[in-house]
Amino acid sequence: MAAQQQATPNPPTFGRYAEIPPEQFTPKQKEAYDYILRERGKCPGPYRIWLQNPELLKAMTPIGVYYQKKLQISRQEHEIVTNCINGKWPTAGYSNEEHEEIAEKAGLPPEKVQALIAGLPTSFEDPRQQVIYEITQTLIAARRVPQGLYRRAVNLLGDAGLTEVTVLIGYFTSVSMNLAVYDVPAGAPDYSPYKYIARDAMTEPVLTPRLPLVDNISHTFDKLPPINLFRAAANARTLYPAFIQYMYLLFKPLELNGRIERLVVLYVGKLSDCNYIWRQNAVVAKSLGISQEEIVTLDRNDTTADCFSDAQKVAFRFTQEALELIEVSDEVYANASRFFSAQALTELLYVIGTYMLLARVARTGRVPLDETPAAAILNGATGTLDAA
């Protein structure tokens, strides 16, 4: 039987839990930490505790990724489940606070979210939401699911949807119980003591690239810096020369506001969990006058914060739907049309699509970060990109 890992002498940093400083990681913990950064872009909430058991963290990560990116139920339906469970395990203050905010941002009425967390009776007009609420409340009360409720659930969700809900109940119960046993309070500091190495602070590549990094690409188009992402994209030798010229045009002034364009690029990187896109474009964003507060706020996924203008908030919502739903809803498109012309909206779609492509090249190709991100500054007088 393997020996149990001894508790570390470090002071508590996440509720009662004393997180392991990166310099004290075992090789397996470093491997697990790099793995979750690749998959989720950060080491969130309970994963910070699970890191003490790196094999457990590696086993749980794909489940978390599934419920973040691939689930078939809606985000509102997901949050009904998680907030019912938060009401069941009230000592998990950290997840209570976090998922109350997420649920309201997803569009659930605040009074219903509060009822879920408080364990008070509530109901939903949408029959899918109602049956998910009833199934969740039945299972977390350790009661038998009656035949009639089961039939309604299968008719509304299908077996695949019902299974997704029941596994989510088990997964998030494990999340809540871990946070409860370590007494992690609401407002616990994010990602401490871990440096946010997936973002601005990272200077050393951690990935072994799948795609070769092509040398001597400056002759193709010398206006852009030879960063690793462009070197990986240059493997498509027939397409790369035209693509890099297109990228150069994309860096020229557009009708779309330059600050909004760069915030959208960052947001695509955020939604794609692409460390490379985020880190590189955080530098470019600062060169355009975007503040550290705006970057940090966007990194928290708080796209409705007061530091953003109404036009920026609308652009974020438009971007999220274009990326996740493919077709932007009528409501969001109409709202965006109040702030942006048809030309600017089309440019916005070009920007979203281009950086979705680059994020997928970076992640699938496992493109390592450059030792130093290129500082790119648009020259408004000449419409050219000055890169160092």
Image (cartoon, rainbow, N blue to C red):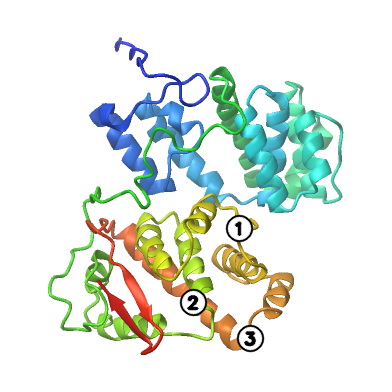
Mark with earlier residue (3, 1): 1
What is the spatial separation of the Cα atoms under label 3 and label 2, in whole angstroms?
15 Å
353 left or right of 81 in image: left
What is the spatial separation of the Cα atoms under label 3 and label 1, in whole angstroms?
22 Å
Residue beneath the point at 75% across and 41% down = 132
Between tags 3 and 2, which lies in front? 2
Between tags 1 and 2, which lies in front? 2
Query: What is the number of the mark on residue 303?
Result: 1
| Residue kind at label 2, given as amino acid type | Gly
Mark with earlier residue (1, 2): 2
- Please name the residue that numbered disc 2 is placed on: 258
- Residue 283: quadrant of the picture: bottom left
Residue beneath the point at 35% across and 26% down = 20
Where is residue 381? Give x, y as percent. Answer: 39, 88
- Residue 130: quadrant of the picture: top right
Where is residue 233? Give x, y as percent. Answer: 27, 71
Where is residue 207? Give x, y as percent. Answer: 25, 50
What is the spatial separation of the Cα atoms under label 1 and label 2, in whole angstroms?
18 Å
Q: Is residue 186 visible?
A: yes
Query: What is the number of the mark on residue 14?
Result: none
- Residue 100: quadrant of the picture: top right
366 left or right of 67 in image: left
Badge 1 element: loop
Residue beneath the point at 22% across and 56% down = 371
In which quadrant is the N terminus drawn? Answer: top left
